[in-house]
Image (tube, rainbow, N blue to C red):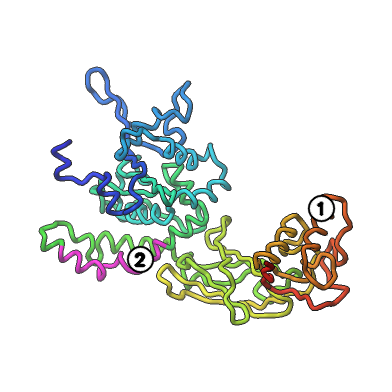
Amino acid sequence: VDALREHVEVPGHEYIARWFPGDDEGPLHEMDNRYTFLDTGALATSQDARLLHPPYARRGIPADDPELYRWHFRARQNEGADELGPLIDLARLFDPSRTTDEDFGREVWERVDVEQFLRVWAVRLNTDDWDSWGARRGKNCYFYFLPHRRRWVLIPWDMELTYGNADAFAIPPIGERYINQFIEVERFLNQPRVRRRFYGILAEMIERPLRPEFLAPYLEQLRLAGVERTDVGLPGGFIDRRRAHIAERIESAVFPNVRLEVLTGGGGTIRADSPLVRIEGRAPVEITHIGIVAGGESLPDTVRFSDRDPLLWECEAHLPAGRRRIEFAGFDGRGRLVDSTGVDVEVSAAFVRGDADGSGRVSIADAVRILLHLFAEASLPCLDAADAGDDGRLSMEDALLVLRYLFLAGEPPPPPFPLAGQDPTPDDLRCGLARGPAVR
């Protein structure tokens, strides 16, 4: 092994330090299959590693016992620390029997560098790198935990069994379930926001790197160096055929077959009774960011992609009463405009008295929102709604009125309450996003 290390770079501290400078002291685990042998020396079993909790259960041994993980996830950095706790927590997250789909969909973005995982798989699966996790074997990759960013990354390793079958590891169209022999990988790639981003990365690949004209100068350098089988990158070769395969499978999810559009309101004017307007739409997978402009001003970045469907997006916008045009612009990962659309939104002046945050009901959050508006310049979607006492001005008394009503059986706010309606006592307060006076 020592002799091999002189010629083969095995990921370790120097490797980690080069790729993650300043964040290079975390646990590094090599994923590999586990061999058992008979007394004669003959091979008895070979179990592929799985990122499950545990990879393989043993009767009478708790799922958190490090011995169930040690031989599948060997430490390659800080080996003396013998710290498997963070890796076991990751396995628990990925295991469908240990976490709900809702928890998984939320936490995986917080604990895993999703973009990095997907880009590793986008290359490995689409070069028919079958001897790896996510393909046919539970091995040949490393899991590294970034201590400062608190996220796991996936490091590829031993990528020499490639370019065999251009149709291997076929991805389904966006509306069909992705099937993988590793249930944890299948779960990950079927999470709607993850699925969307994976197909977006594939769209980038077929646009640029998976083309013979892009690969030509690199192939020439390889030929000059004496590398054989560079035909995989020539027109009609493996990579060209793979690009056509991917393009066919993702065509129902990319522009222009999918346009950036607003679904709320059925394509017509959106009419809302509250300043807090919820809007839903569709977007092609190339779009990674959607900007919003209302009345010539950019709105806060409130658009998020859906946890229900890979092509859906949703947002919440605080808008003043009246009719206005809302414009949406969708950009790809390189900052290029992919598509744009717009919709007319008409907001009535109806509100619920005391509903300071525009949620449609009165709660302790409204008292807090009023105080933040007064003392920390927090915005309010409707000043009139925050005027819980209906005296035509905002003060601490409005927050206290809400609290007395909620917890001390105090008088309810004046109309409109508890249902949304118009202000029966017009004053100078209006609905529309406004900042507080920053009382000192």
Q: Considering depth in this image, is 215 or 155 the residue closer to the camera?
A: 155
User: Is residue 22 positioned above or below 372 on the image?
Assistant: above
Looking at the picture, which amino acid does disc 2 mark?
Ile
- In the rendered image, which residue does mark 2 sit on? 206
Query: Is residue 214 inside the magenta stretch?
Result: yes
At x 74%, y 59%, the residue is: 366
Looking at the image, residue 21 sits to the left or right of residue 347; the answer is left
At x 48%, y 55%, the residue is: 194
Looking at the picture, which amino acid does disc 1 mark?
Leu
Whichever of callouts 2 and 1 sits on the residue coming sooner in the sequence is: 2
* Observer able to see residue 342: no
Looking at the image, residue 9 sits to the left or right of residue 108; the answer is left
At x 57%, y 64%, the residue is: 313
Q: Which residues are magenta?
A: 201-221
Identify the mark at residue 6; answer none if there is no mark. none
Identify the mark at residue 406; answer none if there is no mark. 1
